Image: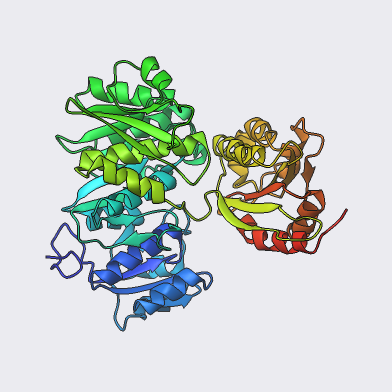
């Protein structure tokens, strides 16, 4: 019986009528999509209209723009459950307050996702960086192997244009978010940890508390399940070593150097060094249950971090029971995820011809550095004169203050950096914390602080020459600037 039509019990909410506060968000919209597909009455609200909201309306969801207690009656009667993202939605939201008055269960997004995954083989992808890309790769690889997995991703696949799906196969692939410890709500059969690096210290307080949540996540794995860790990341590998000592079955993936550094964890997927004249870009040696095979594939997206993510996806799919060679075919066809080194366009003619614009969600120093190194690969194909120009918008005052030195070092990998003001999201401003703080710590003489968001596209275009690679980067509104920068480039903006 489907959870959307199953009768409510004393310990399980009734999900036949669900209201989602912040329904247009990346994570919430995916769950709304699955609920619609499973026959639930879906209502919701968001602060603005969007293509995502319109797509959900086309599926039958009733959605209001703006938050109001009356929105709980969008479905004709009160919902049986209200779902929210506690990190993004204020606790005094009028819809949440009204639900509390009426005694309607108010649940976190992770609670609903856990219910949707119930009864499925759960493949959960976790880590500080790379969750969305690795989850997406796993989905596309399984689809190529003939599976129809359910999935919930924190971004939209360029391959299918969606972030969630109610599939017919037994597998459910999902991104496990650690930012508020919600990943502890799940019971994965296969859990992947791509890397661990302190983040979300506004919630966890200390790096040690942040590390500990991944140890706790490993303990949620079902009996007979698998923990997969990246051997090229010392913190992820150390988490795997501790889990193995507690009796969890742990396997690793990574380069030969990573495997050699952590011999206590069996290297089940080893990325072989590229060989001259080799037809494929990537070769992974799989070793599962004593059987060995080699899988070769090419990736259309650059970056050593993406190669590691692909090996994680290959191993997760193989552990689930899919054919490794067909999984490799899926990785070969993987077209990326929106806002993950997403190509926005290339100038066709004029004085800035050949300049390209990309957009990326990177908002942590390690992510920024990884994307800029990948951009350097693109630039190296264009000759010595081509430059990497980043238009970066810091995300959260607390993160900008905590990692100011690291952000400055990472942004220094670009030839030129245009730093915008902080996108505060849910936070109040902190005195002295703005984009100028990062620029003041950079050694790059061409780095500039641009506090005027609307002036940024022309400022970037003026710094750009033919063949350069421009990246708009950050987790906030900076994604809206890509098309505007392209327009300025096409117009041939000059200093």
Residue 127 in sight from this viewpoint: no
Residue in the image at 40% along x and 64% along y: 29
Residue 373 in sight from this viewpoint: yes
Residue in the image at 31% along x and 55% along y: 151
Residue in the image at 77% along x and 39% along y: 385
- Spot the residue most to the front: 277
In front here: 443 or 436?
443
Q: Where is residue 349 in the image (x, y as percent from the top left)?
A: 75, 61
Q: Is residue 286 above or below residue 13?
A: above
Image position of 123 (left or right of 154):
left
In front here: 454 or 22?
454
- Spot the residue most to the right: 495
Q: Name the quarter where the N terminus is drawn.
A: bottom left
Image position of 195 (left or right of 340):
left
Residue 183: quadrant of the picture: top left
Q: In this view, does 279 lie above or below 170?
A: above
Q: Is residue 35 above or below residue 336?
A: below
In the rendered picture of this protein, how many numbered marks are placed on residues? 0
Q: Position of residue 109 (x, y in %)?
A: 35, 56
In front here: 346 or 276?
276
Q: Position of residue 70 (x, y in %)?
A: 41, 79
Residue in the image at 41% along x and 25% along y: 255
Q: In this view, does 132 lie above or below 264?
A: below
Q: Where is residue 212 in the image (x, y as percent from the top left)?
A: 37, 30
Looking at the image, what colour scheme do you see? rainbow
In front here: 136 or 393?
136
């Amino acid at each position: 019986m489907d959870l959307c039509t199953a009768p409510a019990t004393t310990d399980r909410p009734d999900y036949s009528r669900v209201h989602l506060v912040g329904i247009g968000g990346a994570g919430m919209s995916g769950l709304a999509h699955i609920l619609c597909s499973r026959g639930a009455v879906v209502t919701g609200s968001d602060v603005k209209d969007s293509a995502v909201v319109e797509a959900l309306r086309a599926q039958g969801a009733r959605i209001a723009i703006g938050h109001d207690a009356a929105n709980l009656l969008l479905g004709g009667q009160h919902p049986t459950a209200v779902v929210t993202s506690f990190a993004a939605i204020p606790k005094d939201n009028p819809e949440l307050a009204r639900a509390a008055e009426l005694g309607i269960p108010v649940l976190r997004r992770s609670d609903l996702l856990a219910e949707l995954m119930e009864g499925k083989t759960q493949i959960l992808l976790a880590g500080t960086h790379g969750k969305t890309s690795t989850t997406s790769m796993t989905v596309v690889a399984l689809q190529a192997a003939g599976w129809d997995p359910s999935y919930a991703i924190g971004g939209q696949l360029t391959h299918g244009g969606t972030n969630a799906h109610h599939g017919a196969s037994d597998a459910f692939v999902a991104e496990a978010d650690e930012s508020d410890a919600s990943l502890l709500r799940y019971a994965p059969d296969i859990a992947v940890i791509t890397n661990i690096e302190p983040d979300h210290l506004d919630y966890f307080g200390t790096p040690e508390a942040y590390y500990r949540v991944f140890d706790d996540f490993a303990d949620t794995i079902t009996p007979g399940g698998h923990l997969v860790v990246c051997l090229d990341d010392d913190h992820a590998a150390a988490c795997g070593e501790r889990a193995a000592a507690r009796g969890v079955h742990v396997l690793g993936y990574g380069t030969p150097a990573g495997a050699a550094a952590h011999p206590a964890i069996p290297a089940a997927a080893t990325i072989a060094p590229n060989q001259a004249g080799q037809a494929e870009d990537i070769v992974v040696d799989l070793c599962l249950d004593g059987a060995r095979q080699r899988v070769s594939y090419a990736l259309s997206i650059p970056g050593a971090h993406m190669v590691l993510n692909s090996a994680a996806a290959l191993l997760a799919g193989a552990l689930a029971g899919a054919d490794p060679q067909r999984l490799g075919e899926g990785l070969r066809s993987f077209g990326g995820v929106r806002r993950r080194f997403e190509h926005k366009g290339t100038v066709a003619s004029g004085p800035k011809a050949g300049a390209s614009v990309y957009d990326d969600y990177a908002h942590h120093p390690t992510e920024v550095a990884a994307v800029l190194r990948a951009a350097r690969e693109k630039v190296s194909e264009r000759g010595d004169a081509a430059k990497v120009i980043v238009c970066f918008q810091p995300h959260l005052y607390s993160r900008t203050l905590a990692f100011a030195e690291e952000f400055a070092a990472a942004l220094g990998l670009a030839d030129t950096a245009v730093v915008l003001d902080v996108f505060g999201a849910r936070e109040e401003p902190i005195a002295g914390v703005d984009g100028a703080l990062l620029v003041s710590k950079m050694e790059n003489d061409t780095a500039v602080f641009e506090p005027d968001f609307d002036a940024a596209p022309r400022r970037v275009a003026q710094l750009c020459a033919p063949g350069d690679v421009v990246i708009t980067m950050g987790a906030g509104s900076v994604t809206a600037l890509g098309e505007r920068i392209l327009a300025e480039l096409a117009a041939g903006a000059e200093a």
